[in-house]
Image (spheres, rainbow, N blue to C red):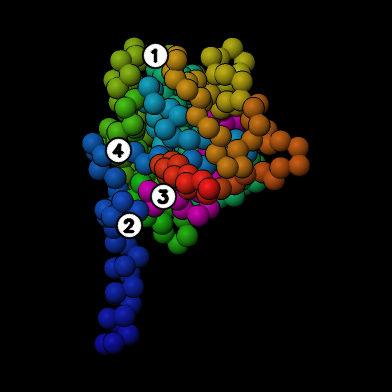
Amino acid sequence: MFVVAVVFAFVSLACGAAQRPDGGEGLLPVGSQAPDVFAADQHGAIQRLSDQRGRAVVVYFYPKDGTPGCTEEACAFRDAWDRFRQANVQVFGVSNDTRESHEQFSKENKLPFPILVDTDQTWAQAFGVPTRAGMTARVTFLVDPDGKIAKVYPEVDPGVHVDEVLRDAAQLTGAALPTEPAGAGSAAPAGAGSAAPAGSPDGAAPAAPGAPAAPPAAGAPAAGGAPAAGTPTPVATGIMLPAASPATPSPSKR
């Protein structure tokens, strides 16, 4: 009886709602502010969620690179990438695989959007996404142009998920929903005929006109998306903290 009770408690804990750093439990609800998190993508470039203000953002969590369902979902976003760009929507895939795994997965499937390294589960915890058997649950969040959670899609079907997300995202941006889907594998990484600026290898949004450039995160690569010579490839994730107040100068001694 004691063993059964212990097993039941363990299973309940593992399947319970995830604790978030903001003190809440479970998936971030609609209307809440999206966390200001950053992470390295498959190319080693730092991607910061708050840099995407002014456009809708799809953040989709998936369990593992290379598995059938995750490959199907990634390729569905790839095939619709041109339509997401036309609707002014950025896509971020997130899992706790390594950067090397992401790089191989991205290369094999010609993924034109960033997939983010979350080995320490900073993003998963900030969004309240649970992990199961060491893998992130399959959950998608749609963030509106003001940085608030507009919709949550728990336990999605990888095969039919993308069209629903694209339709909802286009409504947020006011863009006309493109009717012609891109052919499989036809979407090229941003840079060839796209509006993505240099240093945004996966179509990251440019800064709003007149807005100050965001300071690079610690370990961020040099402009162009590649790490500077002699600098280790950044794989860190994190939550942006407010700047510290300047220290009050001590009175000069006479």
N-terminal of the two: label 3 or label 1? 3
Residue at horizontal 62 percent and vertical 15 percent from the top:
192
N-terminal of the two: label 1 or label 4? 4
The answer, for residue 144, to whether it is visible in the render is: yes
| Left or right of 130, for residue 113 | right
| Left or right of 99, for residue 162 | left
Q: Horizontal and vertical percent for residue 4?
A: 29, 82
Q: Horizontal and vertical percent for residue 148?
A: 30, 33
Q: Which mark is residue 18?
A: 2
3D distance between C-alphas at marks 1 and 2: 37 Å
3D distance between C-alphas at marks 3 and 2: 9 Å
* In front: label 1 or label 2: 2
Q: Find numbered disc 3 in the image and state the secondary structure of the residue it sits on.
A: helix
Q: Which residues fall within the magenta stretch?
A: 107-126
Residue at which label 4 appears = 33
Residue type pointed to by label 2 = Ala
